[in-house]
Image (cartoon, rainbow, N blue to C red):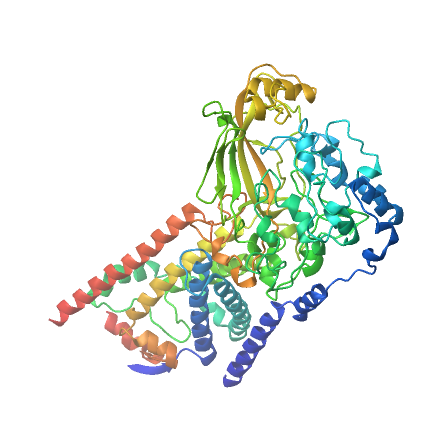
Amino acid sequence: MKKIIIVLLLLFLIVISAVSLLTTESYDESAQMKLKEKYEVKYTSSVDHTKFSILQRKFTDPRDVTEACISCHTGRAQEVMQSNHWNWEREEYVEGKGIVYLGKKNALNNYCIGSEGNEKSCAKCHVGFGMTDKMFSFTDPKNIDCLVCHDNTETYVKASEMGGAPEMSLDFTNIAQHVGKPKRSNCGVCHFLGGGGNNVKHGDLEIAMFEPTRDIDVHMGIEGVNMQCVACHTSEKHVMLGKVYSLSSMNRNRSTCEQCHTNTPHSDEIINEHGEKVACQSCHIPIYAKVNATKTHWDWSTAGKLKNGEPYEVDDPDGNHTYLSIKGSFKWGKKIQPEYIWFNGTANHYLLGDVINDTSKPVKLNALNGSYKDRNSKITPVKIHRGIQPFDPLNKMLIQPKLFADNVGEGAFWKDFDWYRAAEVGMKEVKLPFSGKISFIRTEMYWPVNHMVSSKDQTVGCTECHTRENSRIAGLTDFYMPGRDYSPVVEFAGNALIVLSLLGVFVHGGIRFFSRKKKND
Amino acid sequence: MKRKIYIYKSFERFWHWFQAILIFMLIFTGFEIHGSYSFFGYKNAVSYHNIAAYSFIVLIVFAIFWHFSTGEWKQYLPSYKNIKAQLDYYLIGIFKNAPHPTKKTVLSKLNPLQKLVYFGLKILVIPVMVISGLLYMFYRYPQNGAIKGLTIESLEVIAVVHTIGAFLLVAFLITHLYLITTGETATSNLKAMITGYEELEDEKNKEEKEEIKK
């Protein structure tokens, strides 16, 4: 018998070690170090642009710089002119809509609503010059603004409301001689300030990301690996990897964590398995808008109030606008916990002219598709921007108002503060009917949160989701999750069974105890 | 005449106590995973639960081999004889210091109620727990998972079945811990399961006992 016990004990040990071996993925611990080394190598340009004779002249017109660029970098202009940075649209397949050319021309948002008719102002973030109206030539390579992305002096600035032209006082010669790979400052000037202010749109992309600490973003932290945007958002023929889902619909060309970290980056196999259904970002970005607030609500219905006939603004103590006569009321949030949704990489979009039949729920301007049952879906963190925006209740369409104009009387809301005129002119410009009635409707926009990745020790813990109270994913109810879910019937019956068992034991034991005592007495 | 009889063999005792520890660990970590409380921390609870589960399966394999090779499995075949007498004993007789209605012998260690309950555990509860537990463990988000032939739409059924079994085991554990005090003395059953020896009526004095009964 002793032999059996010894054999059993040995076997038990073997099983335990086998289990621990099985549960540990043969993960190369040095993978992380190799990545760090790879991205810590400073990039040096193979040429020195200050030496090129073509750049030794005095540039006064940015178009001349572009001409100089493309005289050597042949073929690049055509690449840029096929990119969405230039076209502001992508060819996308949208379920239920078929192939659409989706972009700022036909998609609406719940910030400044749409770019149509407002090109002159919006073009500050177009990689081109001269977009003063709809007549902009998308085929003239001299309209390309190479410098906005490739300036490495950090002095290039586009002028406001000039159709994409830069400030004319800039030293274009110096800038042209110091060009290179885009830096965080090049990308950030548009992507951090979209929507008319810092961090208005994304929440995870803001001016603190120009020179972030490691606490803000573990990859881009200047005291860490100090990665640039283009380290992950690599490009092939001027087509960048990664895109935002406010203006794209298909599961392609995404910039992912896995492209560097692989599908099995953890030593714990159970954590790796989470990757089947949970996006990396869900655990590794516990909060966003870490430094400055991001806009969470925009209510257009209150816009247009004037004081003494003049527009005014109200700010919160941090300096964020909470009311602007031209735009309405806002709510902001800082250090926000993301909301979580199922997302399979495809999206649907509200396009100009789409009819809204169900007005009881908020309209999802860019509904992100996905569900538990969908094999491609993962739980993904999002910022949901909630808006209240003008709506034509008879035609059941969102209204594209005319917002910006040079002069009073052209119908622009920002000059005239007249919703009726702004809607009338705006809808006419996009060739859509306007009934003359304006109401306001609730809308939602979904922004996947991908940046501001926290360090390992800040990662979302198991019980922030696997818990009955206040689970981060309490809103995702289409599946059973251990620790959060239970059958109320089984729970009640089970607890009752335990209580009854205990009760039985105590009653029975009590009677035994006293009856024995009696006898002994 | 009473004699000290070797009733629980060493493997049997080893099996019993190892199983006791494992079931306790499984219950304790299992209800943490269930969300009832937190003690070890969720991640630790999961890994302890899995290790205990694998160990339990190994133990079960050995126990099954032992039961069949020794013929001990026959002890667990339920018999309906004397069930009423045993119930009467627990509900009435025990308070009057009446004798146990069934004799404990080497060949018949279990009273009819024990037979019924242990049989239920072995045939129903434990297999259901092992199978639902393995499904739980290998439920690798099925469509993408390791076991492609095993398409499970949802964890819910598995988890709920596993939870029902867990509650039954807790209830069993409570009752079992109490009923071991109902031997000849409050501790005689416990001592027997530790040492293997218990003072039992000698089989040879059967006739003598019969007379006492009369």
Of the 4 image quadrants, the one containing the C terminus of chain A is bottom left
Question: In the rendering, at what x and y percent does residue A230 appear?
Answer: 71, 53
Query: Which one is nearer the viewer's eye here, A322 or B20?
Result: A322
Q: Nearer the viewer, residue A362 or A85?
A: A85
Q: Quadrant of residue A515?
A: bottom left
Residue extending furthest toward the left: A521
Residue at 59% x, 38% y is: A196
Specify whether residue A506 is in view. yes
Q: Count the marks.
A: 0
> Percent position (x, y) of residue A161?
66, 33
> In this orientation, which residue lies closer to the viewer: B127 or A154?
A154
Residue A10 as seen in the image, left or right of residue A252: left
Please identify the residue farthest to the bottom as the structure is shown: A2
Where residue A198 appears, as percent x and y from the top left, is: 57, 44
Q: Would you say residue B79 is visible in this rendering? A: no
Closest to the observer: A104 or A27? A104
Asked if residue A353 lies left or right of residue A301, the reply is right
Location of residue A346 with respect to A120 vertically, above or below? below
Rendered residue at 69%/21% (across/down)? A429
Residue A365 in the figure: left or right of residue B100: right
Residue at 85%, 41% in the rendered image: A78
Q: Residue A173, position in %: x, y?
A: 78, 49
